[in-house]
Amino acid sequence: AARLGYIGVGSFISHSHLPNAHRSDVCYIHALCDIDAGRLRERADLYQPGYVTEDYRRLLDDDDVDIVIIGTKQDMHAQLACEALEAGKWVLVEKPVGETMAEMERVVEAAAAPGRLAVGHNRRFAPAVVDAAALMQPLAGPWLIYHRVVNTSLDKAAGFYGERAKLVYEGCHMFDLANHFIGAYPTAVIASGDGLRNDCVVCEYADGSRFMFMEGSIGSLQMEKESIELFREHGSVHIRDFTDMRVRGFAGEQDRIH
């Protein structure tokens, strides 16, 4: 089993990563690191790792750690990813990789060896997205993609994330997904909004594809958080919250729930 070392075991890591790794037959939670001693004790009681520490350097110096998973707040992602890569570790870093282009370029340089760095962009692996890609990829012509994300939750409206742009810490997921579908990076980006909470973006691609993205923090919780509409020649797919998938233009295909 791959021996995992976690740097940062806060809310997201504890609700997603750790339970999945604990249930896995191919992973072993070898080490947990966090600056909150109480949180470390709680996670240790639940998952019985090999050890816990408040010093992340112990993980980087540990030859028994195969993969370092970085789940701190985003201002530490780039630095920790670089240090872990330079220590010879394989790394999974949560998104965003960094807060500036300079930070991200440093991480890319540190990950010069292929395959050693992964980023926590999970949406491309959702079953509905995998199905949609299989249907849409064989079709001709450019893509037209509309992705709406409106999350009125207040959990990131103050504190650390209160002055950080959602377009970076959440929007990076959507840009990754669009690039994944289209198979390219945009050649031009046009954005309008307040730069923090509510923005509209259009990305243009060399093949004529367009990705339109709206992200907001207003509205009603009674509406789905995410809606993705995909269009190509003679085919359309609409995915709501990665569960309700509507399929049009494909003979023999039906709507489905994931």
Image (cartoon, rainbow, N blue to C red):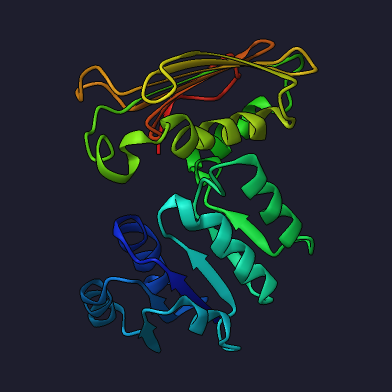
Q: Residue 211 in the image: state x and y as whole percent.
A: 60, 18
Identify the residue shown where x is 31% and y is 63%: 14
Placement of 256 over or under 115, stated as above or below:
above
Could you tell me which quadrant the N terminus lies in?
bottom right
Identify the residue shown where x is 50% and y is 48%: 95
Placement of 13 over or under 88, stated as above or below:
above
| Front in this rendered view, residue 185 or 244 | 185
Q: Residue 119 in the image: state x and y as whole percent.
A: 58, 52
| Front in this rendered view, residue 96 or 30 | 96
| Front in this rendered view, residue 227 or 37 | 37
Could you tell me which quadrant the C terminus lies in?
top left
Is residue 28 found left or right of 13 in the rendered image?
Answer: right
The image quadrant that residue 31 belongs to is bottom left
Q: Residue 147 in the image: state x and y as whole percent.
A: 48, 21
Identify the residue shown where x is 56% and y is 87%: 62
Q: Residue 23 in the image: state x and y as whole percent.
A: 38, 72
Identify the residue shown where x is 19% and y is 22%: 222
